[in-house]
Image: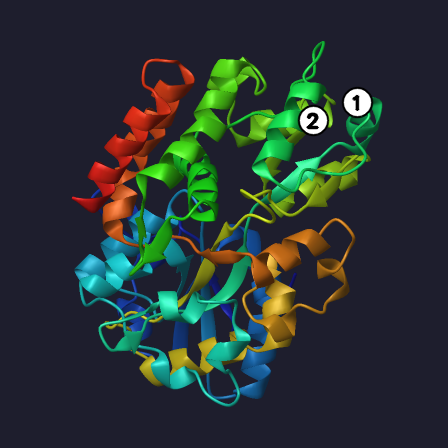
Amino acid sequence: MAMMPRTRIFMGVVAAAVLTLAGTTAYNVAESGARDNTVAWWVPDWDYEKATGLVREFEQQHPGLTVELVQTTGDTVANRTSVALDSGNAPDVITESLSRVRSYAGKGQLASVSDLYGPSMPAGDFAPGLVDSLTFDGGTYAVPYRWATNALIYNPRLFAAAGIDSPPRTWADFERDAKRLTRGDVVGTAWPMQGDPNDLTLRFLDFAVSGGTEITDGAPRFTEASAEAALKLVGGSIREGWAGKSSFELDNTGIRELFLQGRVAMYPAGVFDVDTAVDQGAPVATALLPGPDGPGTAQGVGWGYLIPKAARHQEAARQLVGFLARPENMAELTVTFPARTSASTDAKLTTAERRPYAEQLARHSVPAPNDPRWTAAVQTVHDTIQEVALGRTTPAEGAARVQRLVTR
């Protein structure tokens, strides 16, 4: 998409726009700092094309300002942002994972954006608990725009063939149905034991939160009973055979591929997997996550806009973030769900397959942990789940370990 002449696109390989710090490419904003009408915005590659159109509109509405887009990636944005904030050589706006906001704010590296919330952007218009999860030490340090969660994906043809006429509503239903669906080369469910450890621990924590774990001040507060129940569902299901033992070799992508082939009957996952199945014409339906005795609670995860404390154009950055946070712009940019309820009426967000996700987010979700202590514990929790699945640790022993680890 062509840009207006005064909008500059800076790629990571352009020597004049980057510098190397600690082995990571970071944007050199010294030059733009000398231009008081220029706002530097780091945007991830998946939003880049649509962001160019929004930038064009913003510049038309703010003729005195120019936006420089710098493309990042999901694999590099955390390191690049950390280096930029540590060095003080930061852009004006960064699109970043909300899971890292507390860490940056704890170091005093972010400007509060509390003043942006008000009549035109009420905090109550955002997903439940979302703004509160980004508010601490007297300020709110991000404006969310993209929000997502897991729901249950299932193959209705496999369900019908097994004589199951509806998706599971409870944990007992989930286990019973998975056992009935496991036959031949089909398994009832599967878990991402490989890949990013966050993918497995997120599913474990969904079950734990449904069973009584609370997320307080950005960190999970486990009870041993809720952690044990979650470990039984994830690790125990593999040991008992109603989740595929191939899980030990699978990441999220691997599970999705087996689902598309009709070899995994159901699993908790995000809306991208649903979209892929729909695009490929595979049989797919969705439902709320099962809980102990009804709908379970899932964690919301997402991305938002940060303004570094070192940003050279604070007022212009606030104008850009305020523009991007309008409901229509939020709906245009997100490919999962917008963070604002008033932005959720777009047709692409209300398909039959997406409706359970919208309900899960609106009625049965809480913001995921964003405390750095939880981030540091994720790998050990992941390993504990694997130990239970391998039969080397009992769910009770694993639950005690997880509780000690997170509450110490």
- In this rendering, is residue 182 above or below 298? above
Left or right: where 124 falls relative to 212: right
Residue annotated with mark 1: 162
Along the line of sight, which residue is nearer the eye, 227 or 36? 227
- In this rendering, is residue 7 above or below 195? below
For mark 2, give the secondary structure. Answer: loop
Looking at numbered disc 2 in the image, what kind of residue is underneath it? Ala
- In this rendering, is residue 173 above or below 21? above
Using the rendered view, name the quadrant where residue 49 is placed. bottom right
Q: Residue at x 57, y 30 (%)?
A: 253
**Placement of the C terminus among the 4 image quadrants:** top left
Along the line of sight, which residue is nearer the eye, 123 or 329? 123
Along the line of sight, which residue is nearer the eye, 234 or 36? 234
Q: Residue at x 25, y 57 (%)?
A: 103
- Residue 25 rendering spot, x and y as whole percentages: 31, 48
**Placement of the N terminus among the 4 image quadrants:** bottom right
How packed mark 1 is, by other alpha carbons closer than 10 Å (few <14, some 14-19, many 20 or more), is some
How packed mark 2 is, by other alpha carbons closer than 10 Å (few <14, some 14-19, many 20 or more), is many
- In this rendering, is residue 288 above or below 140? above
Looking at numbered disc 1 in the image, what kind of residue is underneath it? Ala
Label 1 vs 2, first from the N-terminus: 1
Q: Residue at x 65, y 66 (%)?
A: 332
Using the rendered view, name the quadrant where residue 291 is placed. top right
Residue annotated with mark 2: 265
